[in-house]
Amino acid sequence: MTSMTKRFALGIFEDEDVLLHAVENVREAGVKIYEVFTPFPIHGIDDAMGIERSRLPIAAFFFGLTGLCFALWLQIYTLGFDWPMIIGGKPHIALPAFIPVTFELTVLFCCHGMVITFYTISKLYPRWKTPVLDVRSTDDKFVMAIEVNENTDMTKLSQLLRDNGASEVNQKEMSKF
């Protein structure tokens, strides 16, 4: 096993409620869950896994603020200093006329910044083939992945997963994760 290869124990579940209770029980047993893969979102799985609340809304605020500042600077500089024009008798710096462009650039900066930030945090980089631990997790099965090493007792871990409702327990090695 190379240093870039990770081994996983995969617990395959048939039902989301069984999976949700299994996550709580496995964590109580002191086992660290790497990730849970589901074909659709499960309400409460974040809390059961102990995942902290995302800080992406804070990033969204700052991206929006950046867009707002850029839009105002662009319009004030362009229409007030670089190329002043009197349009309809309005002053060079007419803030009410700047509202639509300011709103649009605020939303544009916020959306693009959020997408880039989300992909970076999630490590969803462009690649030819996305590593998938179990293909059935995209269709109808629920997969709990637990990273294992040489010291992990696989029989004990397999029994823990089966006792908590796993229909099958598999091992998988992934070289790119």
Image: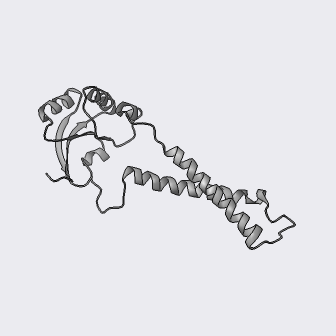
Q: Up-down: is 65 above or below 29?
A: below
**Image coords of residue 13 (percent x, y):** 26, 35
Residue furthest to the bottom in view is 83
At x 13%, y 41%, the residue is 150
Figure colour scheme? one colour
Left or right relative to 176: residue 58 = right
**Image coords of residue 116 (percent x, y):** 46, 56
**Residue 159 image-quadrant placement:** top left
**Which residue is nearer to you in this view: 84 or 26?**
84
Q: Is residue 28 visible?
A: yes
Left or right relative to 149: residue 28 = right
Residue furthest to the right in view is 89
Q: Up-down: is 148 above or below 69?
A: above
**Image coords of residue 11 (percent x, y):** 22, 37
**Which residue is nearer to you in this view: 116 or 165?**
116
**Residue 12 image-quadrant placement:** top left
**Residue 10 image-quadrant placement:** top left
At x 54%, y 49%, the residue is 60
At x 83%, y 70%, the residue is 86
At x 27%, y 51%, the residue is 132
Q: Up-down: is 138 above or below 67?
A: above
**Count of marks, rendered view:** 0
**Image coords of residue 18 (percent x, y):** 30, 29
Residue furthest to the front in view is 81
Q: Up-down: is 82 above or below 139?
A: below
Left or right relative to 81: residue 4 = left
Q: Is residue 104 visible?
A: no
